[in-house]
Image (cartoon, rainbow, N blue to C red):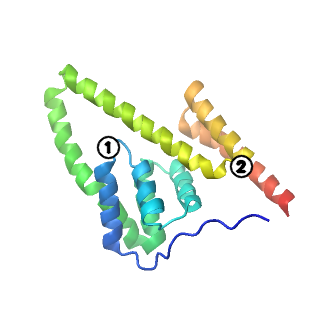
Amino acid sequence: MVPAPEQPKSVAGVTLAALFVEFLKVSLCAFGGGLVWAHRAVVERRRWLSEAEFSDILSLCQFLPGPNIVGIAVCVGAKLRGGAGALAGLSGFIVIPWGVGFALGVLYLEYAHLTVLRNILGGVAAAASGLLIATGIRLLLPHRRRPAAVLFAALACGFMAFSKLPLLAVLFSLAPLSIAVAALGGARGR
């Protein structure tokens, strides 16, 4: 018998303001990407979604154009409060970073020749990469007892890291195969 998936707290009382503020906080904490912070806010702190629901939304956002975190803000908002929730999550996520990014872009154009600035940005990129790897491991942990899930995660990582295949090529090649494997596994379990 398969154990019941963990259930999030009741989300009936989630307001548009709460969605806006949560994704505003995510955007303020997340320089270079907000996946770690969104997971922490939506799954761990607010318990609006379960780990499985968040993983499903992230998987969907991998296929959507644009940054994953923007898709996550839209999808979480839509799941909790419909179209208005999607707009609240998106607005909360982009309003301040857009303004800060615009101002920093103007400054960068003026001072791009400074070596210290290039070194600082390189350090920030390394820190963001570490956070992304940690989040990937955290998202994989609930699936560690599913060999097929671990295998496909390793294949995707390997194809992108070592053979330098683009994300879309990896997704379009592995997704049908992983769906077939999951369907076969589900048919055997019946």
Q: Is residue 136 left or right of residue 188?
A: left
Q: Pick whichever, 150 or 85, lies toward us.
A: 150
Q: Which residue is at a point 19% across and 26% down the rendered structure image? A: 112
Q: Which residue is at a point 26% across and 50% down the rendered structure image? A: 97
Marks 2 and 1, the one that precedes in the sequence: 1
Q: Tell me the element at label 2.
A: loop
Q: Which residue is at a point 38% across and 45% down the rendered structure image? A: 33
Q: Residues within 10 Å of mark 2 (few under 14, many from 20)?
A: few
* Quarter-of-image position of residue 109: top left
Residue 143 in sight here: yes
Q: Identify residue type, mark 1.
A: Phe
Q: Quadrant of the N terminus?
A: bottom right
Q: Tell me the element at label 1.
A: loop
Question: How many marks can you see?
Answer: 2
Please provide percent x and percent y for residue 168. 56, 40
Please provide percent x and percent y for residue 81. 43, 74
Q: Quadrant of the C terminus?
A: bottom right
Q: Which residue is at a point 35% across and 41% down the rendered structure image? A: 32
Residue 164 in sight here: no
The relative height of residue 102 versus residue 74 in the rendered view (above or below) is above
Q: Identify residue type, mark 2.
A: Arg
Q: Pick whichever, 174 or 153, lies toward us.
A: 153
Please provide percent x and percent y for residue 39. 46, 55
Mark 2 or mark 1, whichever is nearer to me: 2
Q: Is residue 147 left or right of residue 130?
A: right
- The reply to whether discs 2 and 1 touch (Cβ–Cβ < 8 Å) is no
Disc 2 versus disc 1: distance between alpha carbons? 33 Å
Q: Pick whichever, 40 or 117, lies toward us.
A: 40
The relative height of residue 71 versus residue 21 in the rendered view (above or below) is above
Q: Which mark is residue 181?
A: none
Disc 2 target residue: 145
Disc 1 target residue: 31
